[in-house]
Amino acid sequence: MRVLVVKVSSLGDVIHTLPALTDARNAIPDIEFDWVVEEAYTEIPAWHPAVSKVIPVAFRRWRKNIFSLFFNAEFRRFRRDLKTSPYDLVIDAQGLLKSAVICGMVPARTVGFDRQSIREKLAVSYYDESYAVSRQQHAVERTRELFSCALGYNKAAQADYGIAAVELGKQAEQVDRSLLFLHGTTWPTKLWPQAYWQELTRLATEHNYQVKLLWGNEEEKSRAQRIAGSNSKARVIDRQAITGIAKLMCQSAAIVAVDTGLAHLAAALGRPTLALYGASDAERTGTYGENQKHLQAKLSCSPCLKRHCEYKGKELEDEEKAKVFTVQPPCFSTLSPQHVWQELARVLAEHRES
């Protein structure tokens, strides 16, 4: 059986889809998947043994000149690629209009979430069949349930990302005394304060850990350099491809992260991770799997699920308000560096004992 999966972005969403493929391969041993994904993330589907072919799409580039898209030779090649293999089924695991449009280019039966299960309800018009999947579940479990409905099996009790970890350098003897800090993310309300990262770096290096800081753009690089400051045990890592980042994760004693796609990569690799959540909801989109610890901000507004902070602190006394608003976003005032270090120390101790 040959199935086309359409899950184009973002990084975390792509990683969340991997356990569904493991479920399907366990239930249907001869199943093979092709996968349409944004060109920046093509490495990830290729890690899974059930994926035969990865078909890159470049909507993030193409949308810059959307009116000439149908005259674009690259886009025409993409459409041809979708028709080179006969598929028994197409699964839209994204549930967006852009992913549904891709499904509509493939001459095969297409399935996806029903109208109550997705935000962009027009996408359902492209499906031959749709399934009700509760939006109250974690994103990993939603995708696993969609695949089980579409392919007719009962999903396993435990999610398994199915990554060939040995190939990525996940070997115990390679783990060193370093901590990987994932400080970059897209929303300002998801950013743990820079001063807090600096203090956490100080606490970690005082306990003889080396701190490694990743970055993906110039803004993140500048922040990483400021966090590292004059600390001789803090190092800003050269920009890495996803596979390189995965190897760094496998070598690190633990990862500290905000709500970012790379945190989900750490979870997929089973690496000890302490993830910090302010505006976003750890219950629905937090890192998922073994060795994962979440700290959710505790202000009344969190999780607000908003890109920009609108908190006014009306329920606070003036003294409390003055303290809370020294931090931006204010919800992270409830996750101090000292508290985070205490929890990180527990994560490190638990992993040493396991």
Image (tube, helix red, strand yellow):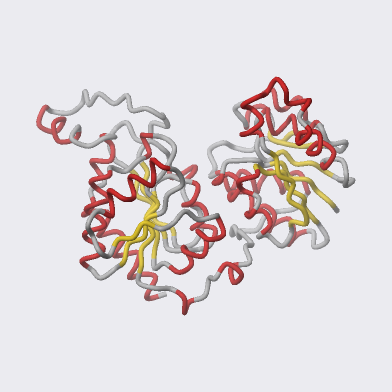
The residue that appears at 76% across and 24% down in the rendered structure is 125
Looking at the picture, does residue 296 appear above or below residue 170? Answer: above
In the rendered image, the vertical position of residue 83 relative to residue 72, given as above or below: below
Q: On the image, which quarter does residue 96 sit in?
A: top right
Q: Residue furthest top?
A: 67
Taking the spot 66% from the left edge, 50% from the top edge, the residue there is 42
* Residue under the point 21% across and 53% down: 199
Front residue of this view, candidates 52 and 218: 218
> Which residue ends up furthest to the left in the rendered image?
319
- Where is residue 35? Give x, y as percent: 73, 47
- Counting from the top left corner in percent of width and height, residue 330 is at 25, 34
Count of all numbered marks drawn on residues in the image: 0
* 120 relative position to 277: left or right: right
What residue do we see at 78% from left, 57% from top? 52
The answer to whether 313 appears left or right of 309 in the picture is left
Q: Residue furthest bottom?
A: 173
Q: Quadrant of residue 128?
A: top right
* Vertical order, 27 against 83 (above or below): below
Question: Where is residue 323 shown, x and y percent of the image?
Answer: 14, 36
Q: Quadrant of the C terminus?
A: bottom left
Q: Nearer the viewer, residue 195 or 240?
A: 240
Left/right placement of residue 268 relative to residue 111 reads left
Residue 255 position, x and y percent, is 40, 59
